[in-house]
Image (cartoon, rainbow, N blue to C red):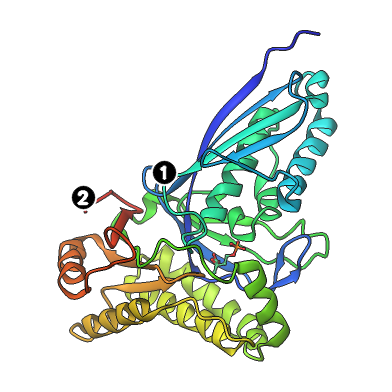
Amino acid sequence: IELKDRSFTCTAPVNIAVIKYWGKRNEELILPINSSLSVTLHQNELRAKTMITLSSSFDEDQMWLNDKEEDISNPRIQRCLREIRRLATKTCSIDPSYLEGHVQIRSENNFPTAAGLASSAAGYACLVYCLSQVYGLKDVDISVIARQGSGSACRSVYGGFVSWEKGEREDGEDSIAEQVCPDMHWPDLQVLILVVSEQKKTVSSTSGMRTSVETSSLINFRANNVVPARMDEMKQAIKEKDFSTFATLTMKDSNQFHAVCLDSYPPIMYMNDASKYIVQLVTAYNLLYSSPRLAYTFDAGPNAVLFTPGGNIGEILGLVQHYLPPNPGAENYIRGVSAGQAVPP
Ligand code: PMV
């Protein structure tokens, strides 16, 4: 049968965790040892874009990332593809002859890949959403499938403030993302990304988490005794738009995540001297006020993400430009301002 190709293009934004996911209880299904919570940035800033064509004329599945052909046999990509095709076979919402066809996937990021800027989160959320469109899937919780590509990707499936509930089940069906509040809930919250380095990280989050789970004695204390209460407090702070509590919890959680990394053996150090300088700068700035007006957080890399109330953004841009030393690693420190209205750098 002569088939017309099914082609879709989708975008998905980066999310920045304010309560960090670190450690898996099941590596294959990507089930975390603790729940986490993030802020999804706006589409026009840091995002992944994916175009997928499904056609009976392709002999094999193929994938390109930023114009370079990637090995599609990567088990995580295969898992996502398998799961989508399984659901498509079950629901039969497209012409069954398409199920015999293959896909060509073209993805691009408009920001450095694998530099601790959550590129895999945006990438897998985008891939899985786009695949679900190509295969005609509706009413399917795609966060469960995106999670199996990259854990944090399940949170990029929703906009605004999103939690990833760790779940209790062994099959992972209850390890899902949920929107805590929509993006327009807190338009005054501004995000500033300081690109300290565009280098790829030296320790991937997968191998870092494994080392931490196997060797850190802090990690279980964090997962069992700290994160559960912190998740509740953070959700409350977001609902009440309580910046001071949001900022304090965000900074403490970033600190604890990096403390767990240092407590691992061999130690994992994602923050560099410039990152530490930013921590000191934010701390000194907040001491000028009775409650915090600026918060930092760092993922598995040296780049900083700052949060501040909108009215403050001019002062923060001035602070950053004045106090940060010239950065040889990246053209410019300030890369994106989002979650609310974009502010010109
Ligand atoms: O989803 P992964 O495997 O890229 O892990 C992400 C881990 C952190 O970015 C450090 C924290 C998080 O919750 O996003």
Left or right: 86, with 51 as reference point:
right
Give the spatial CA distance, label 1 vs label 2: 16 Å
Quarter of the image with the C terminus is bottom left
How would you rate the neighbour count of disc 1 (Cα within 10 Å): few for under 14, some for 14-19, many for 20 or more?
some
Q: Can you give x and y, in whole percent of width and height, for residue 246 in the image?
A: 39, 72
Q: Is ligand 1 closer than 8 angstroms to the Cβ of mark 1?
A: no
Q: Is residue 250 left or right of residue 101?
A: left
The N terminus appears in which quarter of the rendering?
Answer: top right
- Crowding at dot 2, Cα within 10 Å, few <14 / some 14-19 / many 20+, comes out as few
Apparent side of residue 188 relative to residue 107 in the rendered image (left or right)? left
Q: Toward which corner of the image does residue 6 lie, by quadrant?
A: top right
The type of residue carrying mark 2 is Pro
Residue closer to the observer: 297 or 68? 68
Contact, CB < 8 Å: mark 1 with mark 2? no
Q: Say which residue appears at 52% left-offset and 59% top-offset.
A: 114
| Residue 177 found in image quarter | bottom right
What secondary structure is marked by label 2? loop
Amino acid at dot 1: Gln
Residue underneath mark 1? 43
Q: Is residue 128 above or below residue 235?
A: above
- Looking at marks 1 and 2 on the same chain, the residue that comes earlier in the sequence is marked by 1
Please name the residue shown 67% across and 85% down the image.
Answer: 220
**Rendered location of residue 16, percent (x, y):** 46, 61
In what element is the residue under mark 1? loop
Q: Which residue is mark 2?
A: 344
Q: Which residue extends farthest top?
A: 2
Q: Position of residue 264 (x, y in %)?
A: 62, 86
Quarter of the figure with residue 5: top right
Give 36 or 344, whichever is nearer the viewer: 344
131 or 223, which is in the foreground? 131
- Point out residue 184 in the picture as x, y percentages from the top left corner: 37, 49
Q: Residue at x 78, y 22 (%)?
A: 98
